[in-house]
Image (spheres, rainbow, N blue to C red):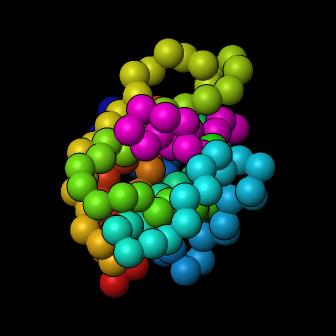
């Protein structure tokens, strides 16, 4: 019984996604990035990196900024957005057909950005298939 439990734990742990260093992530193709705000005096940048891994790998992770669809990311991809100073909401959810359209709620996080800031967020999926988005310090 202990062997079965250990095998199950290691199998499930192997299904979670793994963080990707922003320097190693691929830039998402332009046709899957839907915003084009230029950097200016009153903006900061937000880079979103999707983890690598099998869980949810056949689905796009859709990124939202202030409720608007901003990009679709495959595993190990990233994109950078220039946003105006102030408070914003960053969200992520699965997109696609079949299991990708399971109807799981979009996960959202509030963030504040100042002019010249560079913030990094990571989209990950746990072993239960739940997607989430959190700040990351992997870029530092």
Please name whichever residue, 138 or 89, is drawn nearer the observer in this view of the structure.
89
For the image, the number of numbered tags is: 0
- In the displayed structure, 111 sits above or below 114; it is above
Q: Which residue is at 70% across, 20% downward?
A: 97
| Image quadrant where residue 52 sits | bottom right
Q: Which residue is at 65% across, 36% downward?
A: 59
Can I make out residue 126 in this image?
no
- Magenta span: chief secondary structure: strand
Asked whether residue 38 is drawn in magenta, I would say no
Q: Give left or right: position of 113 versus 7.
A: left
Q: Which residues are magenta?
A: 58-71
Q: Which residue is at 64% across, 39% downward?
A: 60
| Image quadrant where residue 113 sits | bottom left
Please name whichever residue, 52 or 40, is drawn nearer the observer in this view of the structure.
40
Q: Give left or right: position of 15 versus 26.
A: left
Which x, y percent locates residue 42? 34, 68
Asked whether residue 70 is drawn in magenta, I would say yes
Please name whichever residue, 89 or 62, is drawn nearer the observer in this view of the structure.
89
Which x, y percent locates residue 44? 37, 69
- In the displayed structure, 105 sits above or below 21; it is above
Which x, y percent locates residue 78? 57, 62
Q: Give left or right: position of 40 versus 25.
A: left
Q: State the quadrant of the N terminus.
A: top left
Which x, y percent locates residue 54? 61, 46
Please name whichever residue, 22 or 65, is drawn nearer the observer in this view of the structure.
65
In the image, farthest residue toward the front: 41
Q: Give left or right: position of 31 versus 23.
A: right
| Image quadrant where residue 135 sits | bottom left
Q: State the quadrant of the C terminus.
A: bottom left
Q: Which residue is at 47% across, 63% downward?
A: 82
In the image, farthest residue toward the bottom: 140
Can I make out residue 102 in this image?
yes
């Amino acid at each position: 019984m202990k062997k079965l439990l250990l095998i199950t734990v290691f199998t499930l742990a192997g299904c979670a996604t793994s963080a990707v260093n922003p320097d190693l992530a691929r830039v998402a193709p332009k046709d899957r990035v839907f915003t084009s705000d230029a950097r200016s005096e009153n903006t900061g940048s937000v880079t979103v990196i999707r983890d690598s891994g099998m869980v949810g790998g056949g689905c796009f992770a859709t990124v939202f900024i202030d409720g608007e669809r901003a990009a679709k990311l495959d595993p190990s991809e990233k994109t950078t957005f220039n946003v105006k100073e102030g408070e914003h909401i960053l969200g992520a959810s699965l997109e696609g057909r079949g299991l990708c359209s399971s109807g799981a709620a979009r996960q959202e996080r509030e963030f504040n950005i100042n002019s010249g800031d560079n913030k990094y967020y990571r989209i990950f999926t746990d072993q239960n298939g739940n997607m989430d988005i959190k700040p990351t310090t992997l870029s530092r």
